[in-house]
Image (cartoon, rainbow, N blue to C red):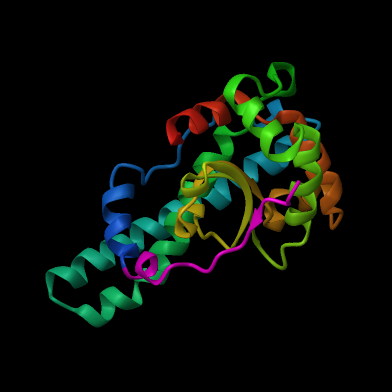
Amino acid sequence: MSLSIVSRAVRPQALNSAAQQARTAFSAMTKLPDLPYDYSALEPAISGQIMELHHSKHHQTYVNGFNAALEKYQAAESKGDIATTIALQSALKFNGGGHVNHSLFWTSLTPSKDYEPPSGDLSAALEKQFGSVDQMIQKFNPAAAAIQGSGWCWLGYDKPTDSIVIATTANQDPLSTQGVVPLLGVDMWEHAFYLQYKNVKPEYLKNIWQVINWKTVAERYSKAK
């Protein structure tokens, strides 16, 4: 069975239209979302201290950064200042991506007491693509651990091939820049694990599967299909 890991270059048109996408996609999403559980609810897989800092500080910073960049963009656009609108696209993409990625991440997690394994169409698709959920994890975790610097590892739905793929993105790049629909993202920035796991990324990756919200992942898969 072939290894379904993809690493694709960001499409130029995705970069060129980043500001316009940001204005339409994020106009109603520029507030920090509430978590659907308490900060300590994911322990022992993820500590309450990490969750509080990650959500209230790091995610809030992306929201603030996006709002500030969008305000500057709109002002520059109203003046016809093309050079400034171009210069702001990287800030919109980085901070907007941070907001979108984290919003998806929070809802991809659930307290271990509420954990349920994949079922239905999602389970069948994972078994078809990888052999089993465990075999998928055996491919996903090394791909995530191999990320150099900061980034994300994803399960995504690739519509052209009608398949579930494992993909990585750098920094806060959304998976959509690769033309793939995100189903599940695991944050590989150090702020997601370092206070608890230090530099032992494999241990973080091992434990996070205890708190994955497969019901939400299955809903995303159904919509993507």
Residue 36, image x, y percentages: 54, 26
Residue 217 is drawn in which quadrant? top right
**Magenta part of the chain:** 1-16
Q: Nearer the viewer, residue 8 or 93?
A: 8
Residue with the most extreme left position: 79
Q: How many marks?
A: 0
Q: Is residue 83 magenta?
A: no
Against 46, residue 16 (above or below) is below
Residue 34 in the image, given as x and y percentages of width and height: 49, 32
Foreground pick, 199 / 202? 202
Outermost residue toward the front in this view = 1
Quarter of the figure with the C terminus: top left
Q: Is residue 24 visible?
A: yes
Residue 85 drawn above or below residue 98: below
State the residue at coordinates (72%, 68%): 148
Which of the 4 image quadrants contains residue 203? top right
Q: Foreground residue, 6 or 91?
A: 6
Q: Position of residue 92 (x, y in %)?
A: 38, 63
Q: Residue at x 71, y 31 (%)?
A: 127
Rendering coords of residue 207 (x, y %): 81, 37
Left/right placement of residue 47 relative to residue 52 reads right
Q: Residue at x 36, y 43 (%)?
A: 29
Q: Residue at x 45, y 55 (%)?
A: 179
Asked whether the viewer can see residue 38, the reply is no
